[in-house]
Amino acid sequence: MRRNLVKVLMLVMLIALCIWQIALLWLGDMSSHNFLVKKDAIQNVILVQPKAMWVNTGGIAYKIDDSKNEYNMLINELRSFVVKGVKNSEMDKDTDKEYEELLSMPGILYEYDLNLGLQELIGNRVADVPNNIAVSQIFVDMSEYTDNKTSLYLVTEDAQNIYKATFYNRLEGHQKIMERFNNPEVTQNLMGYQPSATSNQKQNIAGNNFLPLNTKEAPIEYKVLQVTNPIEENAGAEKINILEQYVNSFFDNPLLKEIDEKGDGSVIFSENMRAIVKYEPAGTLEFNYTSANQETKLTSIERLTKVMAFIRGCTGIPTFLKERIYLTQIVNQGEESIYKFDYKYKGFSMQLSDAIKDKLGLDHILEITIKNNQVIRGKWSVLKIEEDARTNYGTAKVSRGFREIVDEMYEVYIKNKDANSPLEAVQCQYVMDTTNGEMNLKWVVLYQNKWYYP
């Protein structure tokens, strides 16, 4: 009797193993459908990309193109430098250093779009890294750089508080980049930028903006980008087949998901009401997990790690988008946190026009919501962004300088040069104002929470 029972148990185990192997062959590794990696699996990955990185030579700054190898080299070197040296570092609030003074010093500036703790910026849960200081900029001081000491300045978003961290080590890659940009033969063909905080426009522009020193004789040359929706180039079964490549990983059993095609071109995919994915022909993909019930509370860096792991593992997010997004806002609503990302191309940020925001139903190009310890919701653009392939129409120029733009804002829009409120932002950005056509680099100005395009 016992021998027969053992045989039956072994047979059941073999059958279960066969079923599991068949499932893997048909569906892939089902454990990956939640896109969440094992603990510390992306411990050595930079979680937060800078909005921009600047080499400041002492008054004039140069932007480091995020498509260049030196960009990632610098980020990774700084991260490793902080993690390895923080135990022996010294940190204090540098009350004697003014922000304008920093921008007059030679160094390399990491500029982020929001305040974050240092642990989040370096992407590491190092106990010795203080996380009670929220900063939006890291300035690597090269004015007093020595073989055995390096100073970092941590700047809060309003630039009112500056903390100095002294590390007893060297950043060799940063030093080499600094030496390179101090060579006139290297910078003579590069666009220089004037920090507004040290310019004659500082009374007209709040905070600091890096203003390009372009003129009609030396304009900013940029690549015209094309915006298209490759999904809408197909119809019927072919469109569904393409969409399934985006959405199948959201479901435990993609073969059993339901597909509901609407008359307006939208498509809804669902699985036992646990997961719902909706495609809108305007160019967005949205998902909801309706059975989220995880209750484990996470720290801020653990939530960010979870969100970035989701983004990296989600096949529904276009690869080009993953490579060029940067975190711009975190909105906390009760147990939920919404992470919002913007897009940049070769160092220039991209802005959605108000009309496109309404059309896509998005404030930012990518938004992810996490509740407790589970990613439960997300929405993003699936519009393809690429350089204009036409031979004679791939490059354009911005020739108007920032002084002209500032003057026009006060003359045309504000109509009061003595207005008490300064301009909140003056920048050159790509502006997406179409879902099928060209995207150009333009001057954008933020005044009293409204964007203008002079």
Image (tube, rainbow, N blue to C red):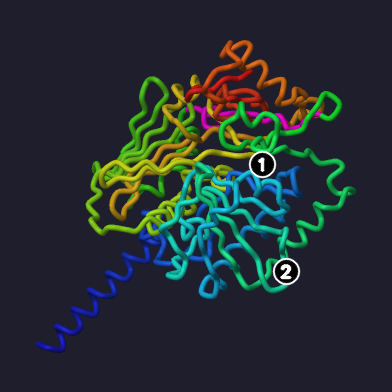
Quadrant where the C terminus lies?
top right
Residue 107, position in %: x, y?
70, 54
Q: The magenta stretch spans which residues?
A: 219-235
Residue 146: give its label: 2
- Callout 1 environment at 10 Å: few (<14), some (14 to 19), or many (20+)? some
Depth check: give the residue in front, 427 or 318.
427
Residue type at mark 1 is: Gly
Disc number placed over residue 153 in the picture, else none: none
Instruction: Pinpoint residue 112: horizontal percent, then vertical percent.
Output: 55, 46
Question: How far from the left and from the top, in percent, is residue 89?
Answer: 55, 71
Q: Is residue 27 at least partly visible in the picture?
A: no
From the viewer's perspective, is residue 171 above or below residue 106?
below
Q: Amino acid at mark 2?
A: Thr
**Is-magenta flag for residue 140?**
no
Can you say whether 3 is above or below 25 in the image?
Answer: below
User: Which element is circle 2 on?
Assistant: loop
Residue at the limit of the structure toward the left, as seen here: 1
Q: Quadrant of residue 16?
A: bottom left
* Residue on which the image places disc 1: 347
In this rendering, which labeled residue sits more in front, label 1 or label 2? 2
Residue 220, magenta (yes or no): yes
Of the pair 115 and 36, the residue shown nearer to us: 115
Nearest the camera: 336 or 249?
A: 336
Name which quarter of the figure residue 174 lies in.
bottom right
The residue located at (40%, 61%) in the rendering is: 29
Q: Position of residue 42 (x, y in %)?
A: 48, 63
Q: How many other residues sit within 10 Å of disc 2, few (<14), some (14-19) or many (≥20)?
A: some
Residue 153 visible in the current orientation: yes
Tell me the residue at 41%/46% (across/down). Answer: 248
**Which quadrant would the N terminus be assigned to in this image?**
bottom left
| SS class, disc 1 | loop
